[in-house]
Image (cartoon, rainbow, N blue to C red):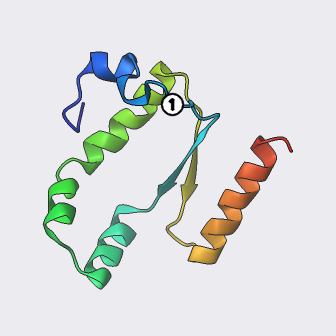
Amino acid sequence: EAMGLSRDELTEKVLASGLHVPTFSILLTVSEEERKRRLEARGTNKNDRENNKINDKILENLFIWAALMNQDVVTVDTTQLTPAEVVAQITTIIRTRIPE
């Protein structure tokens, strides 16, 4: 709903029509303080500023929608991690959740 989609569009999986539904999703998170620091370090643009207005609402509803759509969401807090550490955590999650 935060991005202008109706409840019906989301619950009927209109967006995923004909697509494979994933076994799980990985959500990368970061503390608000660190997110702001990273944005300032790289330089913000109009899209960043517009997205900031709705990010909280999107995150707030993400787990509600995931549950309604029977989706498993695994979170990785990247606040204190290097990019290599994030990759390592994601790799471990995938290897432990997907049988070979």
What residue do we see at 50% from left, 56% from top?
28
* Residue kind at label 1, given as amino acid type: Leu
On screen, 6 above or below 89?
above
What residue do we see at 30% from left, 21% from top?
9
Residue 36 at x, y = what percent? 29, 71
* Residue 23 located left or right of residue 3: right
Q: How many marks?
A: 1
* Residue 37 located left or right of residue 66: left
| Label 1 element class | loop
* Residue 100 located left or right of residue 76: right
Q: Residue 38's image quarter?
A: bottom left
Image quadrant containing the C terminus: top right
What residue do we see at 72% from left, 50% from top?
94
Residue 46 at x, y = what percent? 13, 66
* Residue 92 located left or right of residue 86: right
Residue 93 at x, y = what percent? 71, 51
Name, please, the residue furthest toward the bottom: 41
**Residue receiving disc 1:** 19
Q: Residue 50's image quarter?
A: bottom left
What residue do we see at 43% from left, 24% from top?
17
Q: Nearer the viewer, residue 17 or 60?
A: 17
Q: Residue 73's image quarter?
A: top right
